[in-house]
Amino acid sequence: MYTLRMQWPVLVRLLSILLSFAAVGTATAQDEPTTLRTSPVLRQLLSETLERNPGVQAARAAVEAAEARARGAGRPLYNPELQLNAEQAETRTGTLGLSQAIDWADKRGARTAVADAELDTVRTEYAAVRQQLAGELLAALGRYHTAADIQRLAQQRQELMRRFLDLAEQRRQAGDINQVELDLASLAHTQATLQLSQMASDLADAEQALIAITGNPRRNWPLLPGDLPVLQTVDADTLLKNLPALRAQQARVAAARSTVTLRSRERRPDPTIGVRAGQERAFRNGNGDAYGLTGLTFSIPLYVRNSFRAEVKAAYAEQTRAEQSLQDVYRRARAQLLSAAERYRLSRGAWLAWQASGQASLGSQVALLERIWRSGEMSTADYLVQLNQTLDTRMNALEVQGRLWGAWADWLVASGQVDAWLGGAMRAEP
């Protein structure tokens, strides 16, 4: 017995090493099959969410409004005017005229360019909203399944501590342990119960977050694949070139430049040309002689009181703002892309390290600890330390898995690869 007690620190260290490299996951989670990438259930949930989400519908309505404005901008700027004039004095005069303002500076073309750029903007914003929502859904699913696994682990902890308390009471009655150790077991059970309550609350919050995104509660949320791909060398320039958020800002710059052209052309007055024809009848001594009238009119506004220089200056300022915003968006998008890639690599590396450590059973580890404790070779305090280390190690690993899914969702959004990864499930023209 003395020899065993002298070797116990060595045994504790060996057991700690074994637990540190233990496989991750609860007993129930280990038996669950891993879904394949882009599983039909996941794709269906994503498709339904994108169709019903109010934010997506609002973005689609913005596209429809921009399309209508683009059609309107392509129409002629001025309509013809019909003029009717009648006058009676010493002579009776009646004329009918038609006038038409001429878009001399091609304001119509400038308006069309502005409307087309704005249409490109809202279309790319629509794509960005869909990608952002898809990323939020994937991240929320990851948080939900992580919370569910942690809640199951907390349930196991509570059951283990209940069993530990029962055994401690039996050993106390047999005189193997003192009252302090029994109180310690009771406190451990209480702590496990409180932790289970907190984990259940976290799971409820994660589920409500999913319901807020999808709009409908579900009994079985689709599982997420466990075989996430390796992230190769990141070509930031190529990825950012097709990023919807960046393309939307580029379209805003194009719209601002077209607005400058429009405001400059609006400073050029457009002439109005008209023709008229009629008849004039003069009455002399009761007799009236009729004369035919024809005429040509030409008018042009004089921009004297308002030259519209302020509008042009404002348009140039808006162009500068859009260009500077583009640079800011590009810098932020690039930083977010590289940061998301690095977080994903680190999270995936940590998760692979856990998976490579083996598939040790939680039940066998707990049974080993219990055997040593019941034999009297381990104090109650040491037993609790080792048991909590076993459970905490698994809980930390589940959190690593949750961070992996969050990092992957962030990477998909930051790189604009959501649709590519989901196999085209998001393609939908507004």
Image (cartoon, rainbow, N blue to C red):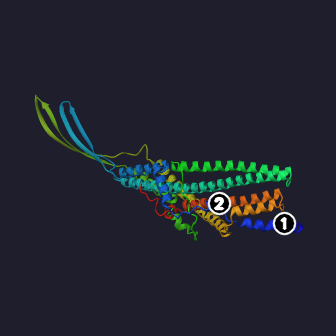
- The quadrant in which the C terminus is found is bottom left
Whether residue 370 can be seen here: yes
Q: List the single residue furthest toward the front.
A: 174
Going by the picture, which residue comes out furthest to the bottom? Answer: 233
In-image side of 286 versus 217 (left or right): left
Circle 1 is placed at which residue position?
8
Q: Can you give x and y, in whole percent of width and height, for residue 91 in the image?
A: 18, 32
Residue drawn at x 33%, y 46% as measured from the top left? 300
Residue that mark 2 sits on: 27
- Looking at the image, which residue is at 49% across and 56% down? 46
**Mark 2 or mark 1: whose residue is earlier in sequence:** 1
At mark 2, the secondary structure is helix
| Numbered badge on residue 56 | none
Q: Which three-letter amino acid code belongs to the residue tagged 1?
A: Trp
Question: Where's the N terminus, which quadrant?
Answer: bottom right
Q: In this orientation, which residue lies closer to the viewer: 236 or 88?
A: 236
- Where residue 4 sits in the image (x, y, percent)? 86, 67
In the rendered structure, the answer to whether residue 303 lies left or right of residue 411 reads left
Image quarter of residue 123: bottom left
Q: How far apart are marks 2 and 1 (CA)?
A: 29 Å
